[in-house]
Amino acid sequence: MSLTSRATLDFWPRTAVRKIAAHWIDTAVQVLAVAKTDEGLAALSAQTELSRAEILRLIEQTKLSLSPDDNVVLGAEVNTKDMGLGARRPERCSPPKT
């Protein structure tokens, strides 16, 4: 399943949208992804200079602007089992000799 929403940030204050766009955050889905953690909410608040309460209100409004299918996709747990913190060694390579 993929994201199909045409949701926008039109109801966000224009200055806030400009400030987060400077950090390459310019879609509703990206905003919701950042807002998934407390640190992300704090970053959005700091970048936009809006209160945490205002950010939370805007996040809820952003969620409501998405299609039901997109809310399902965004609410699904992601399997990160095969993802590490760096590049994965190709399976055909042998481990480095120590």
Image (cartoon, helix red, strand yellow):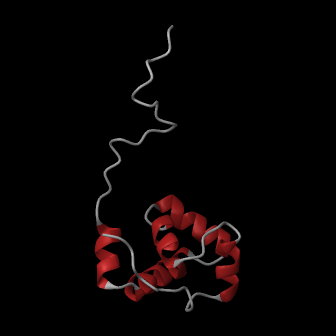
Quadrant assignment for the N terminus: bottom left
Q: Is residue 94 above or below residue 51?
A: above
In front: 70, or 19?
Answer: 70
Residue 24 on image: x %, y %: 64, 67
In front: 74, or 47?
Answer: 74
Q: Is 62 displayed left or right of 78 in the figure? A: right
Q: Is residue 66 above or below residue 77?
A: below
Residue 49 on image: x %, y %: 67, 75
In front: 42, or 3?
Answer: 3
Residue drawn at point x = 34 percent, y = 77 percent: 70
Residue drawn at point x = 29 percent, y = 83 percent: 68
Residue 43 on image: x %, y %: 59, 64
- Disc tally is 0
Q: Is residue 51 above or below residue 96?
A: below
Residue drawn at point x = 52 percent, y = 62 percent: 40
- Which corner quadrant of the image does residue 84 belong to? top left
Residue situated furthest top in the rendering = 98
Residue situated furthest bottom in the rendering = 11
Residue 15 on image: x %, y %: 70, 84
Residue drawn at point x = 52 percent, y = 37 percent: 86
